[in-house]
Image (cartoon, grey):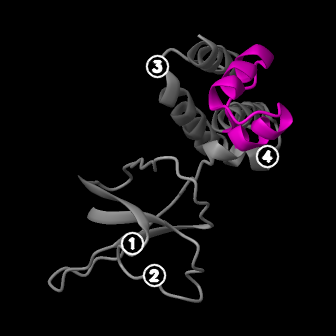
């Protein structure tokens, strides 16, 4: 799959079909194979957007549907804005210093740590239904670990690696 656009908009796509590239966008100009991962990020903007749009430009000779799974949207600015209110400042640098002082990890990292902890508990559970899905849970857990380092073998290691990366 290639030549798709990820955009941000405030127009509800269920009501108004988005027009190709008529929104705040970033074009992904790579080729993705099956089960590949693409990461697109937007520069910080003063505007707030409610919807993420993923569109593919269709060519008449090529009619291939776009299949998306596990689309993750991380809102980094949300945590920063909340901490700005909490610490009564408008400086992102002060917020970052406070995060390090109070050891507050970014939300996306906290989600990964909690997901890993859940999957570890799920894998060792002796429930019959849990045992049926233990292989899938192990694959998901390995995927989370490999996003940070190849040496991670437990959630405790994951937390240490993330803390070292963020708090350095």
Extreme residue toward the bottom, this view? 15
Mark in the foreground, 2 or 1: 2
Residue 55 tag number? 1
The mark that comes first in sequence, 4 or 1, is 1
Mark in the foreground, 3 or 1: 1
Q: CA distance from mark 3 to mark 1?
A: 33 Å
Residue at screen point 46% across, 19% down: 150
Q: Are marks 2 and 1 in contact (CB under 8 Å)?
A: yes
110 magenta-colored: no
Q: CA distance from mark 3 to mark 4?
A: 30 Å
Q: Which residue is mark 3?
A: 150
For residue 122, above or below residue 3: above
Q: Main secondary structure of the magenta part?
A: helix
In this view, the residue in front, 152 or 28, is 28
- Say which quadrant the N terminus sits in: bottom left
Which contiguous range is marked in magenta? Answer: 79-107
Residue 1 visible in this rendered orientation of the protein: no
Provide residue 6's location: percent of width, then percent of height.
41, 62
- Say which quadrant the C terminus sits in: top right
Q: Which residue is mark 4?
A: 128
For residue 48, above or below residue 149: below
Residue at screen point 52% across, 35% down: 143
Q: Which residue is mark 2?
A: 18
């Amino acid at each position: 799959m290639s030549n798709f656009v990820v955009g941000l908009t405030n127009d509800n796509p269920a009501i108004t079909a988005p027009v190709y590239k008529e929104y705040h966008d970033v074009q992904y100009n790579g080729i993705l194979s099956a089960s590949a991962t693409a990461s697109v990020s937007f520069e910080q903007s003063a505007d707030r957007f409610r919807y993420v749009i993923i569109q593919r430009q269709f060519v008449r000779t090529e009619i291939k549907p776009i299949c998306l799974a596990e689309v993750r949207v991380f809102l980094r600015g949300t945590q920063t804005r909340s901490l700005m209110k909490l610490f009564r400042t408008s400086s992102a640098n002060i917020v970052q210093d406070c995060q390090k002082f109070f050891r507050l990890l970014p939300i996306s990292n906290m989600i990964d740590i909690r997901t890993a902890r859940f999957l570890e508990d799920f894998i060792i559970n002796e429930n019959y239904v849990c045992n049926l899905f233990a292989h899938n849970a192990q694959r998901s857990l390995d995927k989370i670990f490999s996003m940070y380092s190849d040496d991670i073998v437990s959630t405790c290691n994951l937390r240490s690696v993330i803390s070292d990366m963020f708090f350095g």
